[in-house]
Image (spheres, grey):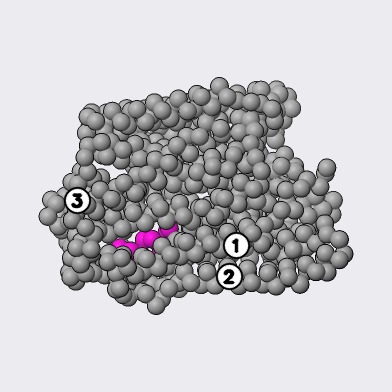
Amino acid sequence: MIPAVLVFAYLAIVLYIGIFAFRHARPVAGEAEDYFLAGRALGPMVFLLSLFGTNMTAFTILGSAGHAFANGVVTFGLMASSSAFIIPLTLFFIGTRMWAMGRRHGFMTPVQMFRDRWECGHIGTVIFVVQAALLVPYIIIGVMGGGTALRAITGGLVPYWLGGAVVAMVVMSYVFFGGMRGTAWVNTFQTVLFLSFGAIALFVIGRGMGGFPAALQSLLASPETAPLLTRERFSPLFFLSYTFIPLSTIAFPHITIFCLTARRMAQFRRTVVFYPLCILAIWLPCVFLGVAANSMRDVPRIAQKLEARRALAAAPASLDPEERASLRRQAAGDDVVPIMLEQYAPLWLAGMLGAGIMAAVMASDSQILALSTMFTEDVFAFYGGKARFGEHVQVQTGRLFVVILTIVAYLIALRAPQSIFDLAVQYAFSGYAALSPLLIAALFWKRSTKWGALAVALWVAAAVIYTATTTGALAWFGLMPVVPMTIISGALMVSVSLITQPPSTATIARYS
Amino acid sequence: MSIVAANETEHMSPARTANREPRTAAMTVVLLASILTLYALHQDFWFWRTARPLVFGFLPVALAYHAAYCIAASVLMWAMTRVAWPSHLEEDPRR
């Protein structure tokens, strides 16, 4: 009961932050800029913590530990340290320039910049459609995660449909009222929770297990678990492929748009320096705990998972697919951190964990707001809505879009199986990484053209569909599909641009 | 990086430009080399098949290496903000 109370208190705080932000709206920079970009006035700490929080999803706390439980220490190198280097690097080179162009030319979305930079209209709409299609699964996953987490935390007291509705309502409310300012403040609060949670959980569980050295020695002693402490089961090429995935971050519309919210470019300085340290602070405890959970063979729920993993490894190729899927579900380790806390932590900490999980699964706020910004700027305003009805109606349209999008996402979340959207999110990462040449070309290459951009957008759409529907597609030489997708994307941008007419020199000069 | 260097020199006096340019070019090369080196260091094949030594008695060496890698990334970013910060972008050419 205590965890459920703490989680509902957390939801109330989050809601209050959103409404508080609404009361503090200062439309000095224009109503739309104030709602969608917080008036381009976020300070250094909110900018850093919110940007980091926006990137942290349910996967960070639960999925990373689950991945490490099954695959070992490789998880950190695959997903954390590569991001710790590539994401700040892209923020340094692309984020700062995007910020400057946004301030100089008044852009609020990447598509607005593409349209202006490449002197195009409908090609921008094509890019909008591809970006939006890749973003929607995240929003649905967020609602599903909320329903599942609330049901688990309340011990089934709150059913899935009600949990999903509560989380969707809370997210919708603070995005609706607070816009970017509310979302950024909530994300800042969530990041502080993440950071506190990792350190406390590590300390409490470590003490409960009688110290980590003993647990690690026990893992090393068993031939079954010793490989989890090395990377011998993974090919170096597969490992290398993962360094392409963080390229997706800067291409995500919610991150690109977020880059426009900084009051000064100096905000990026602190962000790029501290971002790797924030990744270290959150991912290292989660990955380590996931690996260490393999030593808890005396805990029945962990023992069942290990048994299912053994059965899966010994299963013949002819095993019934449903039975294989069932074994995979039993062996999955997404709940190992909650199990460890149940075993070793007091109730109040379990409650904090619940709030931490809720903070993670509610990361869909930024995506909802980004999609609303994109719709109102790239479609509503571009096709004459703003000129005809004015800026106030544009902002109200954005708010209405937030409501409709959340309701649609909730209805889909009630009916569709989560596995479909888990898969879609997985492919969306590759898709966005392959879209990154668009930003690089627009900001750094004068000779780039709209036709090159169109080729990239169409290629990414085709490649995502192809890889999602065909087993082993584009997995060349043991690499993940993201590598050929991104390289081909870059090659298309260069080759198609070189054989087509560049924009006017006046336009190019505005971007020098 | 070359874009940063090119734009920075536009706002300087000829004497300052003459003094600054070789250092900027050298700095650009050093930073580019640092970025490529750090990227290459991510592929630490030398710790691929070993868990030992356990750093602090409990961290497998590969995990400790990648934790240190995050700190190295932070240090490199700090260095880049000190010597290659694109401050020219903060000035609006329309003003």
Q: Which residues are magenta?
A: A72-80
Q: Secondary structure at mark 3?
A: helix
Q: Residue at x 31, y 38 (%)?
A: A352
Principal SS element in the magenta part?
helix
Q: Is residue A396 visible?
A: yes
Query: Given the image, what chain letter belongs to the residue carrying mark 3?
Result: A
Per the image, the residue denoted by label 2 is B34
The total of numbered circles placed on residues is 3
What amino acid does circle 3 point to?
Answer: Gly
The residue mark sitting in front, 3 or 2, is 3
The residue mark sitting in front, 2 or 1, is 1
Q: In the rendered structure, are the residues bearing label 3 and label 1 in contact, judged by CB atoms less than 8 Å apart?
A: no
Q: Does residue A411 appear to the left or right of A99 in the view shown?
A: left
**Within-10-Å neighbours for mark 1: few <14, some 14–19, many 20+:** some
Per the image, the residue denoted by label 3 is A208
Q: Residue at x 46, y 65 (%)?
A: B69
Query: Given the image, what chain letter belongs to the residue carrying mark 2?
Result: B
Q: Does residue B13 appear to the left or right of A110 in the view shown?
A: right
Q: In the rendered structure, are the residues bearing label 3 and label 2 in contact, judged by CB atoms less than 8 Å apart?
A: no
Per the image, the residue denoted by label 1 is B79
Q: Secondary structure at mark 2?
A: helix
In the rendered view, would you say A462 is above or below A235? above
What amino acid does circle 1 point to?
Answer: Ala
Q: Does residue A451 appear to the left or right of A163 in the view shown?
A: right
